[in-house]
């Protein structure tokens, strides 16, 4: 009888320890999410950043979108995902930017003139960053939707 009780206690102890360790990832992810949301609300930022916690470096891609420009949430999430990957790709691989300035002047019949200034800016970036995961999204103070994507870069050793 004692053997059965000891085996049951051992099994309960093993499963309890596994349940505690299984919750560790979500707790860390939730803490990181809360930290980044507080950081954004304190001083809003967009673009790519590298942040570190006690054990890991993370690449963040932060962007905001106007909710009124999208017909549904699925489209807005897809646009946010593509923009986040684009930002991360530019961060890792760089980009080539060209600018062209066109100035047009025209005279009217009364002797006055109009001047049109057109600036064309083209950016070309090559590369792909895979495995960006959406960490969170939330509305900011202006009503725009903030998206934070992240990727674990490296563990500190």
Image: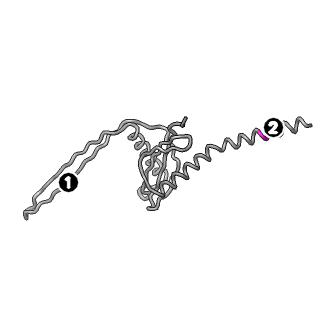
- Image coordinates of residue 140 in percent, x first then y, are 47, 59
Chain part drawn in magenta: 9-13
- Image coordinates of residue 142 in percent, x first then y, are 44, 62
Q: Is residue 114 toward the left or the right of residue 10 in the image?
A: left
CA distance separating discs 2 and 1: 79 Å
The answer to which of 141 and 67 lies nearer the viewer is: 141
Quick one: quadrant of the N terminus? top right
Check if residue 10 falls in the magenta segment: yes
Residue pointed to by mark 1:
117
Residue pointed to by mark 2:
10
- Image coordinates of residue 8 in percent, x first then y, are 83, 39
Check if residue 136 falls in the magenta segment: no
Q: Earlier in the sequence, mark 2 or mark 1?
A: 2
In the image, what residue occupies the spot 51% across and 51% down? Answer: 36
User: With respect to residue 151, does 143 lie above or below?
Assistant: below
In the image, what residue occupies the spot 40% across and 41% down? Answer: 91
Magenta portion: prevailing SS class? helix
């Amino acid at each position: 009888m004692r053997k059965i009780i000891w085996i049951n206690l051992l099994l309960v102890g093993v499963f309890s320890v596994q349940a505690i360790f299984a919750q560790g990832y979500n707790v860390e992810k939730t803490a990181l999410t809360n930290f980044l949301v507080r950081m954004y609300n304190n001083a809003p930022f967009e673009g790519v950043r590298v942040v570190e916690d006690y054990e890991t470096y993370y690449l963040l891609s932060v962007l905001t979108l106007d909710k009124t420009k999208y017909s549904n949430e699925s489209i807005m999430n897809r646009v946010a995902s593509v923009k986040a990957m684009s930002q991360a790709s530019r961060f890792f691989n760089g980009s080539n930017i060209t600018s062209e300035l066109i100035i047009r002047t025209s005279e009217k019949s009364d002797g006055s003139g109009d001047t049109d200034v057109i600036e064309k800016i083209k950016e070309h970036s090559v590369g792909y960053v895979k495995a960006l995961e959406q960490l969170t999204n939330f509305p900011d103070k202006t009503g725009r939707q903030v998206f934070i994507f992240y990727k674990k870069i490296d563990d500190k050793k």
